[in-house]
Image: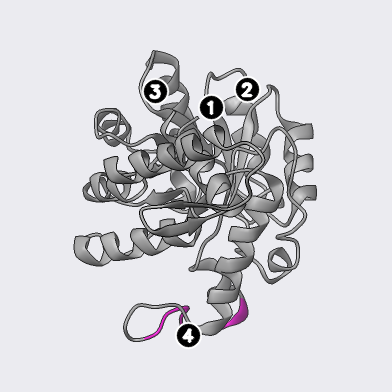
Amino acid sequence: MRLRSLLFVPGDRPERMEKALGLGADALILDLEDSVALASKERARQAVREFVARVADGPALFVRINPLDSALVADDLAALAGLPVAGITLPKAEGGASVDDLCARLAGDYVVLPIASETPRAVFALGTYGGARLAGLTWGAEDLPAAIGAATAREADGGYTDPYKVVRALTLFGAHAAGVPAIETVYPDFRDLDGLAAYAARGRRDGFTGMMAIHPSQIAVINAAFTPSPDEIVHARAVVAAFAANPGVGVLQIDGRMIDAPHLKAARRLLALVD
């Protein structure tokens, strides 16, 4: 499953869900949680069911349910039973045990995408994820500061303050330790596409393989940022070919630069994304 761009869509807005099918996102996250008011939860469940039932192809469909400890989750899961969605997005996840808990409640073999940093307890469980039913790992920079009474997660220039840099890094390494895609969190200012491009580029540089979006205008920018360029593909193929032509050699030279085992591993990872 290719997960460069994952667009949130409110579950109680069927017209937006319909429009989102043709926007170019790799996945849609149909939301039953934060973007849906309490009075609209049941209407959103019904709208999501009807939408998923009539969609034959297109982007992968995930549904973000309400937190496992909420009074709403049982109705969410009952509404999802049997639906042909790709997976479930789990908010307020607190480690691998949360994924196990959810999977035990699910009626179907759905994969799970945890939002893995929204509570203080969750931060200390970022290294506990794993398993075949994990679609990836992502994080958020909004709920956690609210949970601890912080004024914001960001500096005046938009960069993260030190505590949230730590959380981002732990999520990144937690995903790679689990062997699943690391998905960067949203960029809230959907009008600032230049800022988004720089943010997404940093994410890919650091090892994230995709990013969540909150607005259709962000999709093309995110897809471009997380798609290897033709030059990168050519270089990666050259690295793989050089080592294939020189078995048993640990260090080689390409274009005046030394390459070794980490470069080969990176090249293979990039080509796997392309393939």
Q: Earlier in the sequence, mark 3 or mark 2?
A: 3
Q: CA distance from mark 3 to mark 4?
A: 38 Å
Mark 4, residue position = 151
Q: Quadrant of residue 220?
A: top left
Q: Earlier in the sequence, mark 1 or mark 4?
A: 1
- Badge nearest the viewer, 4 or 2: 4
Q: Are marks 2 and 1 in contact (CB under 8 Å)?
A: no
Q: Are marks 3 and 2 in contact (CB under 8 Å)?
A: no
Q: Viewer-proximal residue, 163 or 91?
A: 163
> What numbered label is drawn on residue 81?
2
Q: Viewer-proximal residue, 72 or 199?
A: 199
Q: Give the residue at x 64% y 66%.
A: 170
- Badge nearest the viewer, 1 or 4: 1
Q: Earlier in the sequence, mark 3 or mark 1?
A: 3
- Name which residue type carries label 1: Ala
Q: CA distance from mark 3 to mark 2?
A: 14 Å
Q: Secondary structure at mark 3?
A: helix
* Residue 32 % position (x, y): 49, 42
Q: Quadrant of residue 82?
A: top right
Q: Viewer-proximal residue, 207 or 269?
A: 269
Q: Earlier in the sequence, mark 4 or mark 2?
A: 2
Q: Secondary structure at mark 4?
A: loop
Colour setting = one colour
Q: CA distance from mark 1 to mark 4?
A: 36 Å
What range is drawn magenta here?
148-155
Q: Quadrant of residue 163?
A: bottom right
* Residue 140 % position (x, y): 51, 62
How many residues crowd around disc 4 within 10 Å: few (fewer than 14), some, or many (20 or more)? few
